[in-house]
Image (spheres, rainbow, N blue to C red):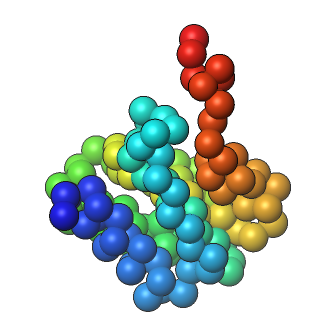
Amino acid sequence: MDKIADLKKTILNTLDKNKALNIVSIDLADKSSMADYMIIASGTSSRHIQALSEQVLEKFKNNGIKNCTIEGSDSNEWKLIDGIDLIVHIFNPEKRKFYELEKIWSEMIPKEKIII
């Protein structure tokens, strides 16, 4: 198994162990060049969201991804941890429903919209 797939599994396990809700992994390989995978999860409170994002950041750094950071540090509703080939979004349930990232990225993007 390759390094990114192993890291994805580690992140999924970390989120699950720490009581993240509705964890979804989306394969972006044929949909975008920005990353290989996107993981989306929900937290139960602003503290929970912050704690989950810090744990994910630590896992990235422990696995050799040193330049990753937490985006949305001023927000209580959403955090993004960019691990280069693996992106993790952690939302409160209301914001997650509003943005519907799973719906956007799970659907296949028509080829007409890919060609620029």
How many dots with numbers?
Answer: 0
The percent coordinates of residue 99 (x first, y second) are 76, 51
Task: Determine whether 61 is above or below 92 in the image.
Answer: above
Task: Determine whether 49 is above or below 2 in the image.
Answer: below
Residue at 35% across, 44% down: 84
Residue at 46% across, 77% down: 15
Task: Determine whether 94 is above or below 80 in the image.
Answer: below
The percent coordinates of residue 12 (x first, y second) are 42, 74
For this orientation, the residue located farthest to the front is 111
Q: Nearer the viewer, residue 38 or 74?
A: 38
Residue 88 can be seen in this image: yes
Q: Where the C terminus falls, by quadrant?
A: top right
Q: Where the N terminus falls, by quadrant?
A: bottom left
Q: Nearer the viewer, residue 90 or 38?
A: 38
Image quadrant where residue 3 sits: bottom left
The percent coordinates of residue 19 (x first, y second) are 54, 87
Image quadrant where residue 7 sits: bottom left
Apparent side of residue 8 relative to residue 100 in the rendered image (left or right): left
Q: Nearer the viewer, residue 91 or 50?
A: 91
Apparent side of residue 57 relative to residue 81 in the rendered image (left or right): left
Apparent side of residue 51 relative to residue 109 in the rendered image (left or right): left
The percent coordinates of residue 66 (x first, y second) are 23, 50
Residue 69 can be seen in this image: no
Residue at 39% across, 79% down: 14
Residue at 62% across, 52% down: 106
Image quadrant where residue 77 sits: bottom right
